[in-house]
Amino acid sequence: MKTVGIIAEYNPFHNGHAYHLKKAKEITGADYCIVVMSGDFVQRGAPALMDKYLRAKIALASGADLVLELPAYYALGSAEYFAGGAVTLLDKLGVVDNLCFGSECGDVALLGAFAELLLHENKVFKQTLDHKLRMGHSYPQARNAAIEASAPHLTAHIDILTTPNNILGIEYCKAILKRKSNIAPCSIRRAGSSYHDNSLQTDFCSARALREALQSSDRPDVILNQVPANARTLMEEQYARTYPIFADDLSLLMHYRLLSEPSGEFTAHSDIDKELSDRIVKYLPQYQDFSSFCDLLKSKNRTYTRIARSLVHILLQIRQEDLSLFLSEDQIFYARMLGFRENAGPLLSAIKQKASVPLLSKLADAENLLSSTGMLMLEKDIYASHVYQSIVRSKFPAQADTSEISEYKMPIVKL
């Protein structure tokens, strides 16, 4: 039995994702595909457009065999933490042979070379980096100079470090190297639109383009030609019932959380230093909504995405001391199932035999299976989902199903 892993957000799922699932199995010869997917909040610092169960169902209908949730602490982390948490989860399953990811260059050997250099940072690299930083260069400028000095053979390819999927691919390779994992990375060249392209005039448009199209329209059909046929019915059925959810749907909850911080100090939360905490306090009286507040807090050193992610850390009470604890105890403590295909029985059996973490199918079993550290991480995933569902029910009150308000009552998706 051969298994390939994919790390994804599917925010939302589109034709490019279906192509990736198909090609991942083809090029690795895998019998099964495991997807590690972000839950109800995503890395750019926003709620997912659709809830995790709908996205898991679409992924299973489009070729995935098992969908696991990436814990919120990593789903909302920087590229390094996002990749590290997801790779660790796949590695601890004990059954994954390959990790297949998309990248702009499609050259896994080249990405691996950059990963090796950036992970180990030889003496010349460190000296050049420190020197350039002391001279006042930005980190990307200093890093590029360090690469030119320590690995001149990579200089011609240094633009790789400017594109988002390449950067994430390098982090996946770094995480595999750091763990000394037996998982072999492979990459598919990204087809169609770039990550930031907002055009729908292509077979493989970006997820960003789909989100923006839905935000500017009141009909789901504006994006349905960009999703695989077996996902369209699911998306049509749930439109204006459970999605779309956008960043500004967080606005009132976010404002309340910022006003509720008893100390007026936010540095206990992950990714927030004293400078950003002071800016939040300074500009809080001008708060209007989530997105405009992110714009207000932007600075030369902080992008909109980094600000948004930091604010969501405050909203969900994601604290640095907790993340440090998780990292010190090897990052991942469970594999929580969101959904699976019923013909994937052999895969589930293999995981139960070989995994070094429990495969969670029922939250009620968690206390008997997890350490206190594992429970701390899981409780944040549950809390994040309850926050997300409160936003859904507030936005679509006529469709609210109060019988399923608790994450403990949400059934695993089976196809």
Image (tube, helix red, strand yellow):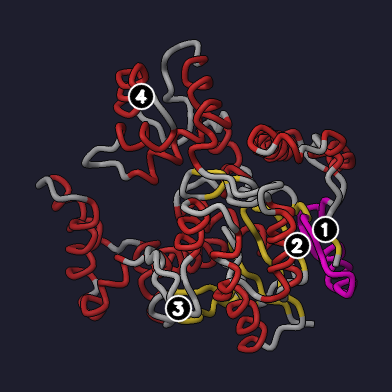
The local secondary structure at tag 1 comes to strand
Q: Where is residue 296 in the image (x, y as percent from the top left)?
A: 30, 32
Query: 237 or 293, which is in the foreground?
Result: 237
Identify which amino acid the numbered label 2 is placed on: Lys
Quick check: marks 3 and 4 in contact, CB under 8 Å? no
Q: Can residue 373 be seen in this view?
A: no
Using the numbered discs, state the Cα–Cα distance from disc 2 to disc 3 in whole angstroms. Answer: 25 Å
Image quarter where the N terminus lies is: bottom right
- Total tally of numbered discs in the picture: 4
Label 4 or label 2, whichever comes before in sequence order: 2
Residue depicted at x 26% and y 72%? 159
Using the numbered discs, state the Cα–Cα distance from disc 3 to disc 4 in whole angstroms. Answer: 40 Å
Quick check: marks 2 and 1 in contact, CB under 8 Å? yes
Q: Name the residue under label 3.
A: 202
Residue depicted at x 70% and y 72%? 96
Q: Name the residue under label 1.
A: 413
Q: Where is residue 66 in the image (x, y as percent from the top left)?
A: 77, 66
